Image (spheres, rainbow, N blue to C red):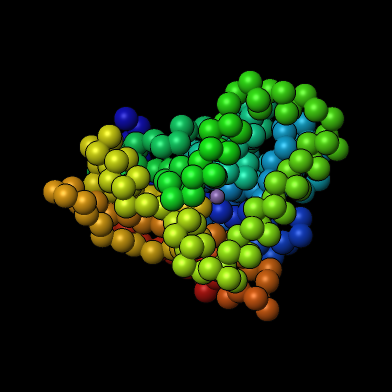
Amino acid sequence: MPEHTSALLISDLHLTPSMPLTAQRFFDFVEKETNDVESVFILGDLFEYWVGDDAGARSPFQQEVLRALFALSSKTKTYYIHGNRDFLIGQDFLKRSGMQLLPDPSKVMIAGDEWVISHGDALCTNDLSYQVFRTWVRKPWLQKLFLRLPLDWRRGIARTLRSNSTAKYERAARYTPDVARYKGDVTLVACANLMGVYGSERLIHGHTHLPARHHESMGSKEWQRYVLSDWDLDHPETVLPKASALRIDLHGVRYIDLVKST
Ligand SMILES: [Mn+2]
């Protein structure tokens, strides 16, 4: 198992040209706040969407992010786990960015403790239709087919999927907030199962946009669950600016508020 003396973990930046302040915060983070750790882990949904490395190569914005990632990985070990928005990030982008892809979930050793790290969407097992969708879109043969489609088609499909899920989620959040919360969060059973399989007592994931530290148990099994925050500095009229990282080193585990430290 790889060992790291110190690490910063981030996820759910949802980088996109229409959120320039969030992107700038990421560029600053890479330049200024990653210099004294051994490793950086990006636990998925770095980008708002990804329809293929060839599309990324043609986007000035994605090239700018690529340069930042390359600068980061040149000085700090940089690991990446696919999210549900950017799971099509492929070998070409990984190679150019210098990021090392880890399977979801993975077990890593940080500051002497074992941690299971994951994006987290696979743990939202109350949302059955999403889990069915996920098993399909993660099939390599279907991904290969999709990546052979013309770029415009791919963008169109991605837009339709995104707006469907956003519309569905917004409707649910408005009319049945309890159901939205129920489907949009990880389940205790899925977490307990994961902790059992990996024989671990520490879990870190993102995806739910519900940053918190939980102490959980099921039967005789107990574990700590740290949820990473999403980042959004571009919609102060609707959401409080948010951006944070989880830092683990020999002093312990803590959230770094990247909004206050700007
Ligand atoms: Mn996600």
Q: Residue at x 32, y 30 (%)?
A: 1
Q: Residue at x 69, y 52 (%)?
A: 164
For the C terminus, give its image quadrant: bottom right
* Residue 127 against residue 254 in the figure, above or below: above
In the image, is 125 to the left or to the right of 171?
Answer: left
Q: Quadrant of residue 89?
A: top right
* Residue 6 against residue 257 in the figure, above or below: above
In the image, is 174 to the left or to the right of 18?
Answer: left
In the image, is 123 to the left or to the right of 233?
Answer: left
Q: Is residue 28 in sight in this rendering?
A: no
> Residue 178 location in percent, x, y?
46, 67
Taking depth in this image into account, of 105 and 220 the one nearest to the observer is 220
Taking depth in this image into account, of 192 and 72 the one nearest to the observer is 192
In the image, is 99 to the left or to the right of 226?
Answer: right
> Residue 63 location in percent, x, y?
75, 42
> Residue 117 location in percent, x, y?
39, 43
Q: Is residue 174 in sight in this rendering?
A: yes
